Image (cartoon, coloured by chain):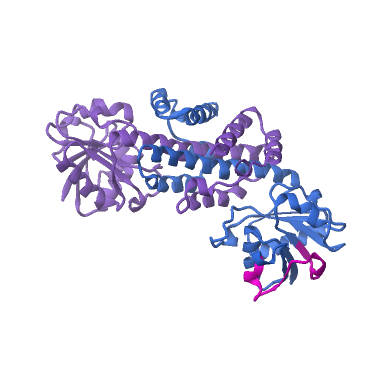
Chain colours: A purple, B blue
Amino acid sequence: MISVVLLGGGNVAHHLTQAFLACKDVDLKQLYARNASSIANFQNEISITDDLNLLADADVYIIAISDDAISSISSQLPENKLVTHTSGSVAMNSLNNTGRKGIFYPLQSFSKTKPVNFSEIPICIEAEQDEDLKILEQLAQLISPKVYQISSDQRSKLHVAAVFVNNFTNHMYKIGNDICKQYDVPFEVLLPLIQETAAKIQHVAPNEAQTGPAKRKDQETIQRHLNLLNTKQKEIYQLITKSIQNG
Amino acid sequence: MISVVLLGGGNVAHHLTQAFLACKDVDLKQLYARNASSIANFQNEISITDDLNLLADADVYIIAISDDAISSISSQLPENKLVTHTSGSVAMNSLNNTGRKGIFYPLQSFSKTKPVNFSEIPICIEAEQDEDLKILEQLAQLISPKVYQISSDQRSKLHVAAVFVNNFTNHMYKIGNDICKQYDVPFEVLLPLIQETAAKIQHVAPNEAQTGPAKRKDQETIQRHLNLLNTKQKEIYQLITKSIQNG
C-alpha cells in the first residue's frame, strides 16, 4: 500500500484523485489546494486542506499545480519525503524540497468535465534514487499499464513533440474550421476524417501515412488551394507544404 | 433498386465496391479498370471489364480514378446517362460526357488494407438536375446516413480544409515523431494524446479546445522549446505559435 498526498485543484489533480480513489492499493491520505473550494467536491471521500502546515504524512507527495508555482510550493513540503510533480516541462531539479525528488507525469490533455480512462494514459516517471523510482513505478502501475522511465532531459523534448501533435494539430483543425465557416460548409463533414487521421497513426508511421497534394507534388492543386486562402492561411499552407516536400 | 457501374481500381473504388455489394438495394452491375488485375479480386462476385466499349447499362456511372484522368474517361461514357466522379477537388463541369453530370464524393482517407465503415463516412453529392440529385441522395443514403449536398465551389473549399485537418495534421505527427527519434524518446508515448486531441474536437469547437504555451502566451516555455528545435522545425513552431496567438 502506497500512501499519497496530492496537491492541486486543477484538471490533472482532479483526475488523479479519481484514479487513486478508485484504486484499493493506493492510500490517498489528503488533498491540498490553496483554494479549498476547488477540491470541496471530494471532501466526503477524503481529508482536504488549504493549509500547508497541516499536510498529512505520506510516502509520496504529488504536486499537480501550475508550472511556475512548483518551485515555491515544493520548498514548503515535509523534509526527507519523496516529492514529485506532474508537469511535462519543469525539470526535476526545480523541486526545492530538502529531501528526495521525482516526477509523476501523466501525458494526456485533461478536461475537467470529460471522464478519463487512466489505463490508456502513459505515465512518465523519474527519480533521483533507484528506490524512489521503484516506488513511483509501483504507484504508476497501479493506475496504468503504460509506465515509462523518462529523464527530465527527454521529458523536455517530449513536451515539444506534444506541442506539435496536440496544440499545433488543434490549430490545423481551427484553420479547417475557419475555412468552412468562411465558405458556409459544415465543419462536421470533416470530423470522421479527423478521427481517421489520428486512428491511422496508431499503426502506421507518420511518413508512411502522409498523403495529399504536397506529398504528390501536385502543383496545380496546391496553386488552386493557395488562391482560396487568406494571407495568414497561405503562409502556413506554403511552409508546411515545403516541409512535407523536403521530407 | 439503383443500378451502378463503378470505374476505378484504387482505394476509393475498392471500398465503394464492398459497400455496394453489401447493400441489397444497390445493383452493382459492373466494375471497370484500365488494368483488370486491380479489380480481379471481385471477379467472382461481379462482372468486371477493362474495355470501355463493353460497359453495362446502369442508372449511375461512378468514376473513382485519379483526378487528372476524369475528364478524358468521362468523354467515353454512354450518352444521356448520369455520370459522376468521387474526387474532392475536381469540379463537376470537368466531366466531359454528353449527358447528365453529378458528384458522389465520400469524404474520408482510405487505405486499401483497412476495412471501412461507410456508415461513418460523409458523402457529398451534387448534380445538375434536381432529379439526378434525388437519385444520388437515395444511392448515398443506402450506404451512409451522412449525406450532404455540397456544390463544386463549396467542395473545393472543403478540400483545402481537409488538407489542413488531414495532411497537415499528419505532418505535425511526423515532426513530433522526428523530435522523439532525435532524442531517443518512444513516439508511442504520444499516441493516446493524439487520439484524445482528435476525440475532443468531435464535441468542442477548435478555438475552445486550444491549449498550450502559445495560447497561454507563455514566452519562457516557447523560448525553451525553440532552443530544442532545428531550423525548419523552429520556423514552423514560430509561425503556428504566432497564428494561435493572433486567434
Residue found 41% across the figure and 34% down from its top: A160
How far from the left and from the top, in percent, is residue B105? 69, 54
In the rendered image of this protein, does residue A37 appear above or below residue B148? above
B181 and B164: which one is in front? B181
Task: Name which quarter of the figure residue A242 lies in.
Answer: top right
B11 and A37: which one is in front? B11
In the rendered image of this protein, does residue B70 appear above or below residue A75? below
Check residue B53 for magenta coloring: yes
Can residue A184 be seen here? The reply is no
Residue found 61% across the figure and 32% down from its top: A238
How many numbered marks have been drawn onto this rendered protein structure? 0
How far from the left and from the top, in percent, is residue B67? 72, 50
Task: Name which quarter of the figure residue A233 lies in.
Answer: top right
How far from the left and from the top, in percent, is residue B1? 74, 72
Residue found 61% across the figure and 40% down from its top: A214
Residue found 67% across the figure and 66% down from its top: B142
> In the image, which residues are magenta?
B39-61
Check residue A45 for magenta coloring: no
In the rendered image of this protein, does residue B191 appear above or below residue B178? below
Task: Name which quarter of the figure residue B100 lies in.
Answer: bottom right
Residue that sits furthest to the bottom in the current view: B44
How far from the left and from the top, in percent, is residue A11? 36, 40
Can residue A38 be seen here? The reply is yes
